[in-house]
Image (cartoon, rainbow, N blue to C red):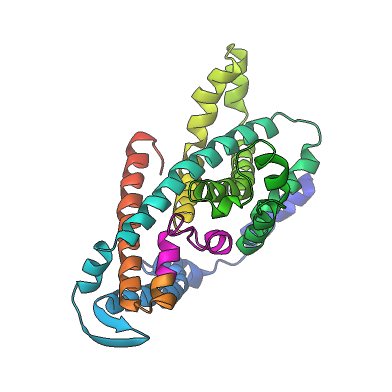
Amino acid sequence: MTKISARQSSAAETAPVDETADYYRESPWYPYALIAPTMVTLTVVALLPFLYMGWISLHEARYGQIGDFAGFSNFMTLLGDARFWNSMKVAGLFVAIAVPIEFMLGLVGALVLSQNIRFRNVLVPFLFIPSMMAPIIVGLVWKTMLAGSWGFFSYNILERFGILSGTSVFASPDLALYGLIFVDVWQWTPFMVLTFFAGMQALPASPFRAAQVDGANPVQIFFRLTLPMLAPLLFVIGLLRLIDAFKIYDTIYILTNGGPGITTESPSVLGYKYTFDFWEIGTASALAVVIWIIFFAFCNIFYQIAKRRLNVF
């Protein structure tokens, strides 16, 4: 080992210095040159379509034809539509219930996995299955499991305990949204478990050993060490999951298509109906712009809070 190290050191000392490479690295334009391909790609596939959508939202656009400049009339039409506010209420309720449940169950599951339980190596690959399934497959599976009268859960649980009989959960105006929340929790909780578990495995061991030597109990170790050290990961995953849950479309489209009535109509489903059912493309574009503005403001507020109070970033 000593001889090999000596040879490597000698080779490094005798290797020719690439002065041209050093010149480019010291250039103030070097960082910008590195990110230029990514920025060009993002501009073409994301920024230009968004700007075009914003331009359409300011014009009369119906039945695939873009007409005269209409100012903010599409936005006024949207804000005056009761279906828009209902979709915001549906999405807000969906996010407020589903994401905290997934977050808490994910944290508990990660803590259990980190305790070196038996069969952990077998259990972890199975946790990938729900998150790897396409939303359309998830929708079809649960549409069958909760089908009225003959669905596995409908027949053995809901009808047997007198909760609901003769119809599907997704056909009930009172239960359809909670059925969708249940499916979302089933699909995405394993993802949260695995993400938090991976984060816990990456934490340094020395602070935990020191805390155990000082006599700290598991609860103190969790709230004083584990949770603060995981704060950046929890913040990022929580924010991404929140955004993803708010714009849910596939599962709702398969299971309820926004019904019964409009009780499960999210903004994404409403945007689809504006575009392809009502052919009000200008209003659909205004809806997308409004949702973008809401998320832009929300993410900035969330970022500032995380930066100041959670010491994230």
- Of residues 166 and 86, which is closer to you in this image? 166
Q: Examine the rendering and report whether any part of residue 26 can be seen.
A: no
What segment carries the magenta color? 248-272
| Percent x, y of residue 301 | 31, 46
* Residue shown at 28% from the left, 78% from the top: 55
- Across and down, in percent, residue 250 comes to 55, 63
Res. 210 image quadrant: top right
Q: Nearer the viewer, residue 195 or 106?
A: 106
Q: Residue furthest left?
A: 71
Q: How many marks?
A: 0
26 relative to 177 in the view: left or right:
left
Q: Is residue 294 above or below residue 194?
A: below
- The furthest residue to the front: 166
Check the picture and name the quadrant holding the C terminus.
top left
* Camera-nearest residue between 302 and 30: 302
The spot of residue 240 in percent (x, y) is 47, 51
Please provide percent x and percent y for residue 259.
Answer: 48, 59
